[in-house]
Amino acid sequence: MEKSLATKTTAGSLGFKRTAGLIAVLTSLGAWLFITHFPFSSIASSSSDVDLLGSGWNYMPGASINTNGLYITHLGRTIVQQDGTQGQLNPPVNSYGTHLQMTGDFTVVADIKDIKGSATLQFYSSPPIVQDEFRVEPKSLRINLNNQTATVSTWDGYSNQNLYKQVPSSVKRYAFTPRAENTIVLTRKDGRLTVGVNEASIITLPRNTNFSGDAIWFGLDAENPGDNWTLSKLTAKSLNSGSVKAVNMQDNSVITKDNQGLQSLVTAKHSGFLVGAATALPPATMDSRYRQTAFNNFGSITTENVLKWQFVNPQPNIYDFHEADALVEMAAKNNILVHGHTLVFGEANPAWVQNLPTGTDADKRHVKNVMVDHIQQIIGHYKGRIASWDVVNEPLAGYDNETSDRLRHHKWHEAMGEGYIVTAFTAARHADPNAKLYINDFGLEEDGERWETLLALVTKLKSQGVPIDGVGFQAHVYESEDRIDSSVLRQHIRQLANIGLTARVSEMDVYDDDGESVQAKQYADILDVCISEPNCVSWTTWGVSDKYDLWQDDDNVLQHGRTFSWDERFDPKEVVLQMKSRLKN
Ligand code: XIL
């Protein structure tokens, strides 16, 4: 496994001297680096400690609470790039839990003990937005303790649009003397940040860099396989005239609904029909407008990325449900149903899955076991809590990827042929007999080969008694050629009704190059079609606000789209106005 992007990409690695006791002083440093030597006890304190560890850590990925504090284990999450390679690290952040809010000067103290291997503490200005192929690094500061080396890395934050540059802007290494209990201290004094390890100050950052802001979110990680450690104390205290406060986002998760949300308007006329949105955890926790808009308007959420393989099962036998659990719990608290996305997919698979061999019969059996185990673990964990699942996502070959059977030839197909679909649905039904099970794909809204292939496939599955309940029409409208003809979609939904299957519009989003009215009409027309067909049970859009409509272009540059229903300020766009006005008529 790659150790860290930090070590891989930082130019001119800085040599360090090991000196006993005090931290080594480095030469050849960037102009902004100041070395100071005062012991931390000399910092003036003006308030009592605020405990940050006492509550709000039960959804921290990779962590478990015990009598010594918070026990951190290795998750090894990295993000799969579009070309299938594993790129950015995706270390955990306590998003649905406690963070620090502060004004003015403050100090944070973390006690780190029983380090086996290495320990990483990261201070973030906000939780990162995590997509499938990249994560947008906010300003942050990472301190890694490994043997006798403390590595301090800094990230500059969001303004850097090029994702390849979203590696640390600086990485410095220092010698330190490890103890049974190590103390990391982060201090902001007169707007200037200082980091210390074991009572020695090792680095001072320039003004207006990381945490010139008013919040710190915490990341804890054990970087290498087998690493673990315990966080036994995390406190903050204000200095001079500053203030500090521990905020647990679990106390802020229930929103007040009005009766003008989309779901309320739908329910008034079409009881039982669900309108939903794909929802992500970081904006749901850190952004109250996102939370309010999503939970007020939608009666269903789809787990956008948190239940994809690379996030939930990043290493063999490592399942981490904390983030998905957080989303599911937030939904439950707001009386919202959850649609699980997704179990078997050719994308978003971690390296250990991508690298499974399929050459021999034994290899193939192993791949099958891995897939079945994954399905059982995931559905089993959410039995009774997740109402429906995309069991098989995007089984059809892509437009530029023709195959003999028109199916996508990914790992699962390589190992099991078309039979992987039967195996997946059978395992899913077994794991939760009450969950509704879907096949989900794009480009099914128009006539032609894709639709014919899919219809033939599900017709065959139904006739063989395979436990499939329905088909998800992704309904992505990314360009003019994707425009959906209502009557064609209606006919496809009816063809499913004829063979006893339900339909859902599962991931709708619409480009806006032709203006907001055209965008709005497309959205509203498709919602109308779905509502009016008895076997179309729900309609889901793939996002809430344009604020979080982020994607990566072919050059890995971050792009901002306007394909969703609320604008970046969370004002309703014409999409919402038009859908609401039709629902009221
Ligand atoms: C998307 C995610 O929403 C993004 O965060 C990611 O960057 C790319 O993938 N069809 C699917 C979804 O089934 O899983 C995809 O989700 C969109 C296309």
Image (cartoon, rainbow, N blue to C red):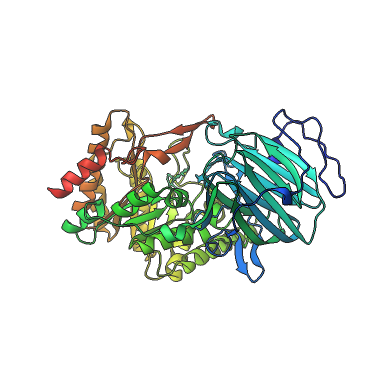
Q: Name the residue nearer the viewer: 364 or 313.
A: 313
- The x and y percentages for residue 185 are 68, 50
Instruction: Identify the image quadrant of residue 259.
Output: bottom left
- The x and y percentages for residue 58 are 54, 64
**Location of residue 273 with respect to 87 vertically, above or below:** below
The image quadrant in which ligand 1 is located: top left
Camera sees residue 533: no
Camera sees residue 322: yes
- The x and y percentages for residue 145 are 74, 51
Give the mark count: 0
Using residue 397 as the reference point, say whether residue 359 is left or right of it: right
- The x and y percentages for residue 321 are 52, 61
**Location of residue 207 with respect to 102 vertically, above or below:** above
Using residue 320 as the reference point, say whether residue 489 is left or right of it: left
Q: Residue at coordinates 86% horizontally, 41% vertically from top-left?
A: 17
**Location of residue 308 with respect to 188 vertically, above or below:** below
